[in-house]
Each structure stands twice: as C-alpha cells, then as structure tokens.
Image (cartoon, grey):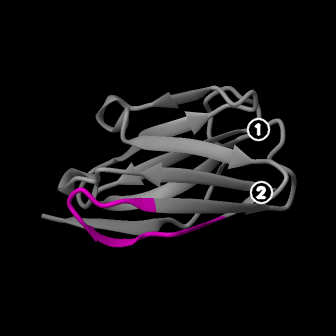
Amino acid sequence: QVQLVESGGGMVQTGGSLRLSCAASGRTINGLSMGWFRQAPGKERIFVARISWRFNTRYTDSVEGRFTISRDNTKNMVYLQMNNLKPEDTAVYYCAADLKNDNAWDYWGQGTQVTVSS
C-alpha cells in the first residue's frame, strides 16, 4: 500500500508560480514511477507529468516548458513546479504511483486545488 498526500495548491494570478508536493508513505517510492494528473471542473482527469524510477520525465504538451516534475527518494517526495500559470491550468491536481512502471496507476492522492485567475 502507498498513501499519497498532495499539498501546495492555492490561488495565483496568471503568470504566477506554485510548487506542488506529494508526500508518500507506506513504502519507499524508490523504484516506482510517479506522476501528476489534473481534473478541471466538468472534465475528465488527464495526465500532466511523469517521472520514472530512472528519473526520465515526460509531460503533456500544454505544460511542456512551464512545469517541472522532480522527485527526492530520500524524502519519499515528488514535486511539480508550475511556472507561468494560465487560467486553463485551473484544476484539482492529483499525485499517482505506478508500482510496475507500466503506466497503470495504482495509487492516488486526494488532490489539491489550483486556481489561476486572469
């Protein structure tokens, strides 16, 4: 079992920055792929970013160059640095863990709200 708790959400103006954190417990995240997803009001949850156990990263096109995913295995933490935020980034952001590194996400956090005002 992996428990994930997100934090760091809030309200910012267009062009601002936020850093989301995901604290994992229950087991080490070393060896797992970790990811961030988001769900806007009335829309499906979508992929945002992924960092593999080898620290390879991948992003959805709309955040490429603005968001950076990182991890600290020693602290069992995953981060999402979000810069140059836009109103369309407004969503609930979720952290997820992929135990088998097969893009099947096994555990999810409860989410943290990010609101970007224009």
Point out the frontmost of discs 1 and 2.
Answer: 1
Query: Is 70 placed left or right of 43 in the picture?
Result: right
Q: Would you say residue 90 sits in the magenta stretch? A: no
Measuring from the top left, give residue 104's x and y in whole percent. Answer: 62, 34
Q: Nearer the viewer, residue 96 or 56?
A: 56
Residue at x 62%, y 44% (from the top left corner): 70
What secondary structure is found at the residue carrying circle 1? Answer: loop
What residue does disc 1 label? 32
In primary-sequence order, the first of circles 1 and 2 is 2
| Amino acid type shown at disc 2 | Val
Residue at x 85%, y 61% (from the top left corner): 26
Tell me the quarter of the picture where residue 32 sits: top right
Q: Which residues are magenta?
A: 5-18
Measuring from the top left, give residue 117's x and y in whole percent. Answer: 18, 67
Q: Residue furthest left?
A: 118
Query: Is 96 placed left or right of 13 in the picture?
Result: right
Q: Would you say residue 16 sits in the magenta stretch? A: yes
What residue does disc 2 label? 2
Q: Are marks 1 and 2 in contact (CB under 8 Å)?
A: yes
